[in-house]
Image: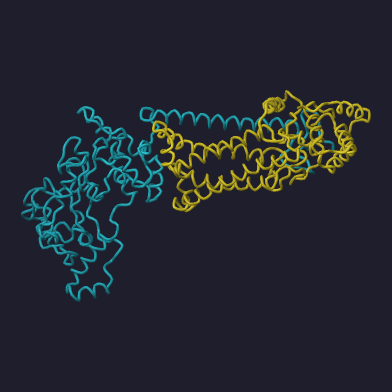
Amino acid sequence: MKLSTEAAAILETSMHINKVSDKERSDIENVIAAMPDDRVMLYKNVVSNPIGDLPRYSIHIRIQHMLTFVTFLTLAFTGLPIAFFDHFWAQPLNSIIGGVDVSRVIHRTLAGVMIFSMLYHIVTITLGPIQQMMGSRFEWRRTIIPTLKDVRDFKEDILYFTGTRNQRPEMDKFMYKQKIHYFAAAFGNMVMIISGSSFLFPEFWAAVLPVDIAANFQEMMRLSHPHEALLALLVIAFWHWYNVHLAPGRFPMQWTFLTGKITREHQIEEHFLEYLRNLVELPEERAYLMDILEARELNASEETIATQVGIQISEEPES
Amino acid sequence: MVRIPKTRKTWWLAVVACLMFTDSGLAFEDDEGCLLCHKYPKMGRITDEGTRRTYYVMPHVFGSTVHRNVPCTDCHTYIKQLPHREVKTGVTCDTECHSIKNPATGKPFSHKPIAEQYQRSTHGREKLAEGHDADKPYCVTCHRNPIYNPDEQGPPPRIVARCVICHEDNKFVENWYKHTSRRIREVKRSSEEIVALCSSCHGDERLVQRHMKAAKEEGRELGRKYRDAVESYNESFHGKITRYGFRKAANCLDCHVDNENYYLNAHFIRPSRDPQSPVSSENKAKTCKRCHTYANENYAALDPHPTDDPQDSPFRYYAEITYNWVGNVVIVLLVSLAMLETIGRRRDGVGWRLHSGSSWWRRSKRGRNRII
């Protein structure tokens, strides 16, 4: 496979970070060169373990996801019956929970747990990169930070879905959908915390804000808390659960949130740039890939490999 | 339809009929003989306006109410003979009860002080009122003849046995026990009951419109929230959790009544423009402080009756429209993306589940299939 300039740069950076030996570099280049040019044929022909093949999330991220997942749903189910009091489902749901005397205690307690989860996440995404920087292993393209490439990826993905483009774009560890979802959740979390605090400590907000703003602020928060909660619940139900449960290839469930691992075919399809890093970091993945390429007779000819290795070596990583 | 005959002859026939079927076991002393007729369930009439009036008195129920010791004619003072004449005004609650003495002053007991206080409030009206005053509540709109301790049959025998040692009379002891135990308990209505009571008038759209029209014609000013008072309260956090039965959230009277002497001032509700009102601009912050300890003038500016009416609260109105649009657009876009993604990937051969380690086992319409 002839790598794009972008992919070649990622590969080169990864090899540099991992301080690969000449032999390993040669192995990696050979594997890359042996891969078929049509990436679709690559992810169509690998064999994946449903519970995951390649590392993706640390134990900290999995704990944070679990805390957010449990608190979010419970907060929604204890709060929405109050906000949407007049709806037919509200009073039965509130009764099942135990009435407002119970649900208000649960709601406030779990709000505290959700805030803890958020702080835990902030600590993780701060200390993790600091540790990587100290070991000169930090790579910002591997983070959730949005870039212009995400806009390009989105456009190219739409072209693939509509049948205009032959390939999905080469996306990094976090693709555009995950970045949208992550920042929407982060924004939503902040809205819920601020608006929730305006219910719990209305005197505080009235005291710190000018009188002209205080009333409108409180109105905005009264609207924001239930609207944001409902929007988040709908996004989770119709989009997030689609992406991780209902989408073809992910059904009935992606195990990543429990095992921290992603399937090989998923990694190659949607996170190809991260898969290149996997090839650098995991010798056993290189061995596996060579075996499967040979077994399926997908590997490129020796002449092609020799040519492509030469081209690839000459590529300079992007700054 | 039951109509009481008005001629003297038929009246006497009715009395004779009553006497023939009189039950001897009454639950309270009926020295005036009112139950001769009023103990019959069919006793009543339909007014010229078509309203059904029942004059039936259930002796066993009345005998358990707070007024059970008050002779009928103490309140129905206009009844001088039996059978009595047509009742024009009915009972007014500021009548003095000549049979019941106020134990503190020795004077005839009366609800006059509270009735006079009520008369000065924004709700004040005469028993027989006309015009928009007729829409206002009279005493009996809110107060009926409640039963003493409905959950309790009577005082425990050991208490009666102890008290009669000095007080000698079992009935006296039982009455005192019921009277004091009822007062010691919280006799205030629950928040839900208070909201329901106030809503029975303030939530009556026709009544509100009628009153607003009259006020406009007379050039009277009404409160900014008068029109939406109930709806906006029900939409507020206070209203929602109160309707769920939570008792610590503010109900109507918690804010609109001066709590210095709650039971007295509940009968002296003033409009918010009156400086004496606890929700007037002068007193609002102080009123909020009853529950929200650190409330200040800024806090008092928060709207306890939020509405999405563009004239009342344009900020909230436009913010809500924006929120609804953003929410709908986001959901439509994301669901569209998910559908497009499914169609696009399915066309290239992806299946829902992994078969033999791959979800790309279906035939691709793009001509590149998994190698089996």
Where is residue A155? Give x, y as percent: 68, 25
How many numbered marks have been drawn onto this rendered protein structure? Answer: 0
> Is A211 or B93 nearer to us in this picture?
A211
Where is residue A107? Give x, y as percent: 50, 48
Colour chosen for chain B: cyan
Q: Classify residue A208 by image quadrant.
A: top left
For residue A303, side relative to residue B258 (left or right): right
Q: Is residue B1 above or below residue B271?
A: below
Q: Is residue B224 above or below residue A202?
A: above
Q: How is the image coloured?
A: by chain
Residue at the farthest right position: A303
Colour chosen for chain A: yellow
Q: Is residue B179 above or below residue B290?
A: below
Residue at the farthest front position: A134
For residue B245, side relative to residue B277 (left or right): right
**Where, quadrant-wise, is the C terminus of chain B in this rendering?**
top right
At x 21%, y 48%, the residue is B140
Is residue B231 in view from this perspective? no
Where is residue A125? Give x, y as percent: 65, 41
Is residue B357 in view from this perspective? yes
For residue A147, side relative to residue B98 (left or right): right
At x 22%, y 59%, the residue is B65
Where is residue A75? Give x, y as percent: 53, 46
> Is B209 or A132 nearer to us in this picture?
A132
